Image (cartoon, helix red, strand yellow):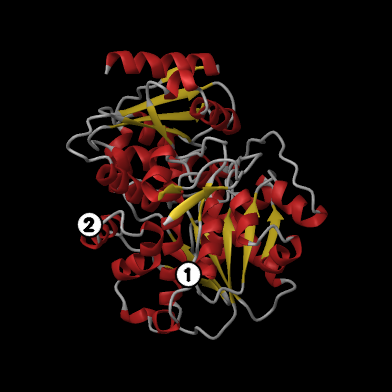
Amino acid sequence: MQYYSLHKKAPSVSFKDAVIKGLAPDKGLYFPESITRLSNDFINNITEYANQEIGYEVIKQFIGNEIPEDELKKIIAETLTFDFPLIGIENNIKTLELFHGPTMAFKDVGARFMARCLGYLNADPDNDKEVTVLVATSGDTGGAVASGFLGVKNVNVVILYPSKKVSDVQEKQLTTLGKNIKALEVEGTFDDCQAMVKKAFLDESITSIKQLTSANSINVARWLPQMFYFFLAYKQLKNKDKKFVFSVPSGNYGNICAGMMAKKLGLPIHGFIASTNVNDIVPKFLQTGEYKPQPSKQTISNAMDVGDPSNFIRIQEIYNNDFESLKNDLHSYSFTDDETREAMSHLYKKCNYIADPHGAVGYLGCRQYQKKNHNTLCIFLETAHPVKFLDVVEPVIEKSIDFPPQIQAVMGKTKEATFISSYAELKSFLLRKTSND
């Protein structure tokens, strides 16, 4: 499989090069040159396949022969080691829980898959060159990447996160592991972190010395495995004849973009809802046809505090940059913090379900969509365990939430992070690390 830059000013590359480079030299995101629909037989008989078998069938065309079949199946088996239950909430509304992995966030799948792919692709015994994974996080990416890459040979991880804009649990997960994981606490927003990361990729004074790659969803090995969720949800549906839509809490738009890829592969998804907080770039785009990035605003659903979503260009590519075609499949709604809290309260009191603020926004998207689209089944993605947002969730439901074992394991550890406030400080850190390695 070859991958091309969406800016179309750089050569096409292999899967290996797309993973290791992360971003194309022309600043574009990589996109697969072809997408082949899966067989109707596979889709119609999906319940007969184990989750790992589904993952292999979905992803194999995007890897090609660059990872042998046995090795790829091993990578997928080590990635999909936990459940993804589909839970009934209300009539015609369900949630797909994606938080049963080691860091209790949906990003565990992409991070684990990418870490194992990169470990294999960089394991040439004649190559002792280290790769530095440079990643910005608005919350859960950092912890998932830290966990997924911990101890991977010849891979160092540097995580940038916005100071005082992630939850205590999230911060502990990305600042306490040590070994090959380093955390940088940035004075600013997630967009500032992401801008620094992108700038570093294009800084030849760094890249001439150090091989950088990204573990954000801009990286194809982080983005594509998110397709698994949509197939695993479909596997669990009892009535597969009903029109069903996915409501996806959306910040950088990698997850919903993966869902659209799943539809391109033949999964009979009726449509998508991009549910977001007051960072409403995409809802406004669908209303006006004008895409206008804006400074991000801080909310209680911090993983969606993104003012310039990286993956939206991939969504436009999937739909051939046809605005009307995209609008046929995509609805998008924006909700305030007060509305999010009200949804969390409703879900707990009326449905006996504790949602994190991101899942609550996804639920609100379902409710808004079904006002005009009756007789559809709406599945919202619950992307993180509510324990990761105790300061938001507990006051709303007026109940203490017990720490699961995954969280207990990190909360007593000491935070280790380097504070930076400029790109110059990031550059100095990266070059200093090179000289000390």
Is residue 11 shown left or right of residue 157? right
Which amino acid, by three-letter code, is at mark 1? Thr
Residue at image position (42%, 40%) is 215
The circle drawn on residue 36 is: 1
Please tell me which residue lies in front, 32 or 243: 32
Judge by depth and name the residue closer to the eye, 20 or 348. Answer: 20
Which of the 4 quarters of the picture holds residue 372?
bottom right
Q: Residue 330 got which mark?
A: none
Give the residue drawn at x 35%, y 22%. Answer: 416
Q: Looking at the picture, how far across and down is residue 392, in whole percent?
A: 54, 43
Image quadrant in which the C terminus is located: top left
Is residue 7 shown above or below 373?
Answer: above
* Image-based side of 56 in relation to 362, left or right: left
State the residue lying farthest toward the right: 288
User: In which quadrant of the rendered image does the N terminus lie?
Assistant: bottom left
Q: Nearer the viewer, residue 190 or 390?
A: 190
Position in image of residue 430 (x %, y %):
40, 19
The reply to whether the C-beta atoms of the residues labelled 1 and 2 are less than 8 Å apart is no
Tag shown at residue 71: 2
